[in-house]
Image (cartoon, rainbow, N blue to C red):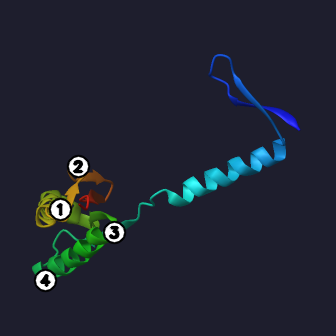
Amino acid sequence: MDLVEIVPNADPPVCRVVDYKKFLYEQKKKQKEMKAKAQKIVVKEVRFGPNTDEHDFNFKLNHAKKFLQEGSKVKAFVFFKGRSILFKEKGEILLLKFAAELEEYGKPEGLPLLEGKRMIMFLSPKKKK
């Protein structure tokens, strides 16, 4: 048996006489249980080009709707190849249109950001009632 300090911040500190190995085992077990109950965030990606056609846009939009309804976050990005980086405005318009179409399923976490050759935007699902 060992003297184990339970609450060091209290005045006076709270201690208990227990088997230390058993105490550590129970703490690990509690932490494992808390970790299992924690909600895991899944991020799904949707990739566009700056000149994505209407049909392709709608196809990817339907996939994103499904992902948001499942409760996953959606990472939409426009990938610029070669000289297509000149059409940054097209990419931004495309992502803003994408966010506007998904307004009832999720909300954007910010405006589109250009990182290297990618313009990225995250959408998180709306809370279910």
Determine the secondary structure under disc 4.
helix
Badge 3 amino acid: Glu
Determine the secondary structure under disc 3.
strand
What residue is at 76 percent from the left and 51 percent from the top? 25
Q: Which residue carries the number 2 mark? A: 110
What residue is at 21 percent from the left and 66 percent from the top? 84
**x, y percent for residue 80:** 26, 65
Q: Of label 1 and label 4, which has the lower sequence position?
A: 4
- For the residues carrying marks 2 and 1, which lies nearer the camera in this image? 2
Badge 2 amino acid: Gly
Distance in Å between CA atoms under marks 4 and 2 = 26 Å
Mark 2 neighbour density, 10 Å: few (under 14) some (14–19) many (20 or more): few
Distance in Å between CA atoms under marks 1 and 3 = 13 Å
Position of the C terminus by quadrant: bottom left
Badge 1 amino acid: Leu
Indicate which disc residue 45 carries: 3
Q: Of label 3 and label 2, which has the lower sequence position?
A: 3
